[in-house]
Amino acid sequence: MNDDVLREWVHVSYAENSQMTETYGFVGSQGTVNLEGVLLRPRRGKNETVYLMMHPSSTLQLLPLPSGLAEAGTSVLCMGSRYARNDSALIFEKVVLDLGACVRYAKEQLGFKHVILLGWSGGGALSLLYQAQAEHPTITATPAGDPIDLAAAKLLPADGLILEAAHRSRARCLSEWIDPSVLDDADPDVRDSRLDLYSPELPVRPPYPKDWLESYRAAQLARVRRITARVQETLELLRKRGGNERERGFVTHRTMADPRFLDGAIEPNGRPIGSCYMGVPETANNGPVGLARFSTLRSWLSQWSIDHSHADGETCAEKISVPLLAIEHGADDAVPQPDVGLMYRACASADKTFHCLQGASHYFKGQPQHMQRSLDLIRDWSQTRGW
């Protein structure tokens, strides 16, 4: 650990009355939302700028990039949302409020003049949703219809935004990764072998024929929408019953079956073929941390439904005006290759910059040279804008 970098525990809290307890323990069940994070800052000198990182459901302070930025002389605030390490009940609109509390804390309590959102991976769509709502608030309810007024929250806009190794949305990822061979979500062993990516009976092999791939993608979307329809029906059933039962949890099996994992000809980049960021794709397909494995009804609509989630990075990018730096990792084994470029092109800002780090994997594992290039890009971009 570098002695030139100070690491300080940060606690951000704010009042919120929830209709039900959705996070375990003290985090948000006593009328107060409690958020934890780490401020990394150089021991010497004083910074007026901080890079703020938040992921909807993960913590980011152990990634190599925050430490690298701090060692290079800049401050980084890594904050967890209320759903850190457990996204089963995650409501994106509430994560926006969490991020808003952290932006305000960075400016008003920590005294930073400039706050730059650094959206890594799933933090990209979150940062774009936050900035879009800070500049042009429109959301007054969650996709399940529960009231949540982001205009009344008076979100402070960030001064700039960085996307690095970021995908467009969790819902888009799910719609392209979910296993379409599942015919009965109550019994994942009832499958269509013509669409079972990992079955020896699959009638095609990579490179997959265009017509088969189109039918596969259509079946993926159809399965997501079947689950969404069941979620909506269950919510309506609970509402009609009255009483105090408001939510249910459920399991979605087999959600890691993107043909891109096995076919390098689909949207090619330098990613390894036959693996993914979770390891062996067939194992991850039904593993415990697969995408959307455990979810509540409301959470499904907010973060996994392609037709309902507000957290679509490409759409949100059309509403932001602050400077944007977009960095694609050229060998990303987690983020679909087109996503960073699509969000960059959609961004409404007149000041936007795009770079691709050829050969860089998602986490820079064993790639200090690529991480250094990223640090240089961020430093130069920031200094040019007086940050």
Image (spheres, rainbow, N blue to C red):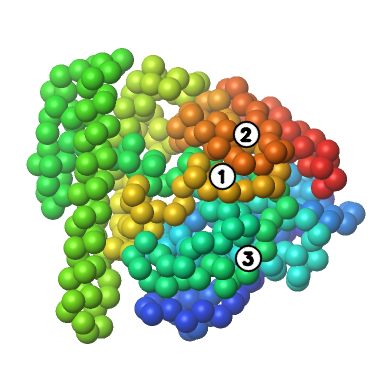
Q: Marks 2/1: CA distance?
A: 15 Å
- Badge nearest the viewer, 2 or 3: 3
Q: Residues within 10 Å of mark 1 (few under 14, many from 20)?
A: many
- Label 2 residue SS: strand
Q: Nearer the viewer, residue 132 or 18?
A: 132
Give the secondary structure at mark 3: loop
Q: Residue at x 23, y 75 (%)?
A: 239
Q: Which residue is mark 3?
A: 155
Between 113 and 150, the residue placed more toward the observer is 150
Would residue 242 appear left or right of 367 to someone viewing this image?
left
Q: Earlier in the sequence, mark 2 or mark 3?
A: 3
Q: Mark 2 or 1, which is nearer the eye?
A: 1
Q: Is 142 situated left or right of 287 in this image?
A: right
The spot of residue 144 in percent (x, y) is: 33, 65
Q: Residue at x 49, y 21 (%)?
A: 269
Q: Which residue is mark 2?
A: 327
The residue to which callout 1 is attached is 317
Where does the image place residue 174, in percent across and percent down from the top left?
34, 43
Q: Amino acid at mark 2?
A: Ile
Q: Which residue does the image show at 59% across and 58% down from the upper left?
A: 136
